[in-house]
Amino acid sequence: MKSFFESMVNIVRGMGDALWFLCDILGHILCGRIRIGEVLKQVYEQGVQSVIIITLTSVASGMVLALQGYVAMSRFGAKEYISHLVALSLVRELSPVFTALVFSGKAGARITAELGTMNVNSQILATKTMGVDPVEYLVVPRFLGTIIALPVLTIISEIVGIAGGYLIGVYEANIPGAFYINQTIKAIRYVDFFSGFIKVAFFSFIISWVCCYQGYFTRGGSLGVGQYTTKAVAYSYIYIIISNTLLTKFILTFWG
C-alpha cells in the first residue's frame, strides 16, 4: 500500500513538473525570447534530415493502400474509386499518424538524447553558470523546430503517398492517369485536409513537449540517457495514438 501511494505521489509530481516546464517554455515564446538562428538549425536537423525516411514510408503506404483497394474494389467493379480510398485515408488519417510516429522515433529521440547528454555531462548547469538561460538557448529552439517541421513533413507525406497510389492505380489497375488525378482532387475536401492538419498540430505539440521534458530532466549518466530516450519515444507513441482517437471522434462528431 505504501509503495502504491508513493507511486501515485511520484506520478502527480511528475505531471506537475511537466506542466511547469511547459509553462516555462511557452512563457519564453510569448515574451519573444526566441533565437531564430537556433530554431532554423533545428528545423533543418529535425525536418530536412527526416525527409527521406518520411518519403519512403509514405510512398510505400500509398502503394499498399492502392493495391489493397484494387483487390477489394475489383470484386465489385469499382476500381475507379481507388483514388478516393488512397487520398482520404492518407489526408485524414494515415499521413498525420505515420509521419508523427516516424518523426518521434527519429527526431524526437534525437532531441531527448541531445538534451539528456548535455544534462548528465553538466553542460546545462554550465550554461546557467555562464548566465545563459538553458530553456531559451536549448529547449525553445527544439520545441519550435518540431512545431514547424512536422506539419511540413506531413504535407510532403500526403503528396508522396498519393503519388504512390497513382503509380499502382495507373500501371496496375489500368486507370487513366488524368481520370485518377481528377478523382483525387474531387475526393479531398477542405474539411478533410484541415482535420488532418489539426491532428498534426496536436502531435507536434505532444512530441516536442514530451521529448524536451524527458531530455531536460534526464538522470543516471549515460545509462539514463538511453532509458529516458526510450521513455520519450514510448510516451510519444502512446499519446499520439490516444489523442488521435479522441481527435477523430471530435472531428467526425462536429465536422463529419
Image (cartoon, rainbow, N blue to C red):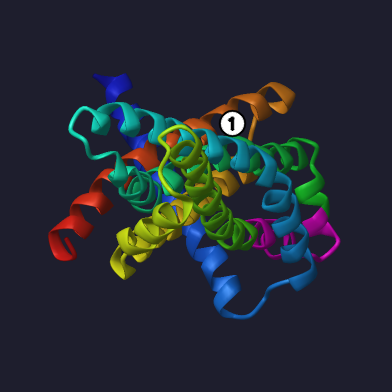
- Would you say residue 198 is visible in this rendering? no
**Which one is in front, 136 or 103?**
103
Residue ID at (63%, 46%): 216
Q: Which residues are magenta?
A: 127-142
Query: Residue 248 location, x and y as percent?
Result: 25, 51
Residue ID at (57%, 42%): 103
Quarter holding residue 156:
bottom right
Task: Left or right? Give the position of 227 relative to 98.
Answer: right
Give the answer, above or below, for where 136 lies relative to 44: below
SS of the residue under disc 1? helix
Pointer 1 local density, CA inside 10 Å: few below 14, some 14–19, many at least 20? many
Q: Is residue 133 magenta?
A: yes
**Which one is in front, 113 or 24?**
113
Q: Is residue 143 magenta?
A: no
Task: Left or right? Give the position of 183 relative to 125.
Answer: left
Residue ID at (67%, 76%): 33
**Which one is in front, 52 or 198?**
52
Q: Amino acid at mark 1?
A: Tyr
- Quadrant (top left, top right, bottom left, bottom right) of the C terminus: bottom left
The residue that mark 1 highlights is: 228
